[in-house]
Image (tube, coloured by chain):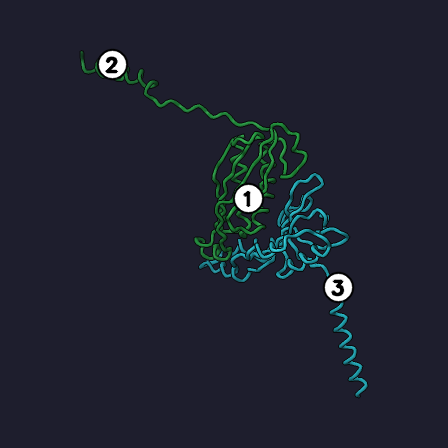
Chain colours: A cyan, B green
Amino acid sequence: MKLIAATLITLGAAGLLLAQAAPTAPDQNVRHVIGLDTIKRNATGTLTVQEGALRFKTGKAENTVSIAAIDDIFIGTETTQSGGKTGRVVKTAAIAAPYESGKVLTILMRTKVDILTVSFHDPDGAAHGAIFALPIGQAAIMRTQLVQAGAHASPDESQASAGSKP
Amino acid sequence: MSYRTTFVYVVLCSVLMLPSTAPAQAPAKPKLSASAVQIAMVEAGDIQIPAEFRFAVYERLVERVRESGAFQKVYRTGDRAADGVTDLVTLHTKVQGFQEGSQTKRELTTVFGATKVEVAASVTARDGHTLMDQKITGRVRFFGENLGVTNDLAKRIAKLLGEKF
């Protein structure tokens, strides 16, 4: 009996350690707000730092920005509506609900996101600004990854972008 | 002279005098001309505005001005390809006011929570003289997230450029 208990505890501890050590999968829920030429606005996909580039990949398209081309990185927050396009349709339809009860959806469907702004230049020197909406808490992690990979970022700019009101 | 003749005489005189008394119509201002425009990065000056708003205005401006078709070429700031263009004009936008609202308040009350960005938009020629200078305000009043204000502002600036060029 003691042997079974010890085995279970050992297995449990090992599982916990493995879970902590495993690399986190890239978040599939990053929204491209604007700024990448080959990606549609409001497309969702994954944002990763790989092979010296910032990669944004959707089901149909991919765009990379070389780390060396990044001039600055800013983070901020924004309160927006969850549910994407479907959420917008539902909210629009709810306007017809009696006694303005549809407005309850506004409260229920609000969500806070991080905003990551990456300022970069193309091979001709032209300035671009790519803006992404990430799940809350992810922008700072992404910024750290980019800086560790060699991206240029103003040290005090991370706090410059104040959060938006809900 | 009968009353009838007097009346006809007065009416005739009035009709004849009309062209001289009517206000002279202002001649239509000739449109400015340039084949290319370079969009400068949005300047914040002393105004506290989050970076995402500045960059979103810049990106939207590039998009909207391209769509407007007012210029054959639209260059971004820093683009070396613009160096050789002789009749290049530059669009400058400087933020003069920013009021960040709240999407939730807007949608619940429809009166409060508007987001507003006020900019001074100016166009300068290569020699530095100002061709156009105007104050423009972008707003988001009801639906949409705060960043939507950048689209409204860019739309207004692109429309103004379409009218002037």
Residue positioned most to the bottom: A1
Left or right: B155, with A30 as reference point = left
Q: Do the dots labelled 1 and 3 sit on one chain?
A: no
In percent of width and height, residue A142 lies at 68, 57
Lower sequence index among marks 2 and 1: 2
Q: In this view, does A141 lie above or below B34?
A: below
Q: Is mark 3 on a helix, strand or loop?
A: loop
Look at label 3 and name its amino acid. Answer: Pro
Q: Which residue does the numbered mark 3 point to in the structure image? A: A23
Q: Any mark on residue B9, and which?
A: 2
In percent of width and height, residue B125 lies at 56, 30
Q: What element carries label 2?
A: helix
In percent of width and height, residue B14 lies at 28, 18
* Screen quadrant of the C terminus of chain B: top right
Q: Neighbour class for label 1 at 10 Å: few (<14), some, many (≥20)?
A: some
Look at label 2 and name its amino acid. Answer: Tyr
The residue marked by circle 3 belongs to what chain? A
Disc 2 and disc 1: Cα gap in Å? 66 Å
Tell which tag, 3 or 2, sits nearer the viewer.
Answer: 3
Look at label 1 and name its amino acid. Answer: Glu
| Residues tagged 3 and 2 counted as in contact (Cβ below 8 A) | no
Left or right: B35, with B95 as reference point = right
The residue marked by circle 2 belongs to what chain? B
Disc 1 and disc 3: Cα gap in Å? 40 Å
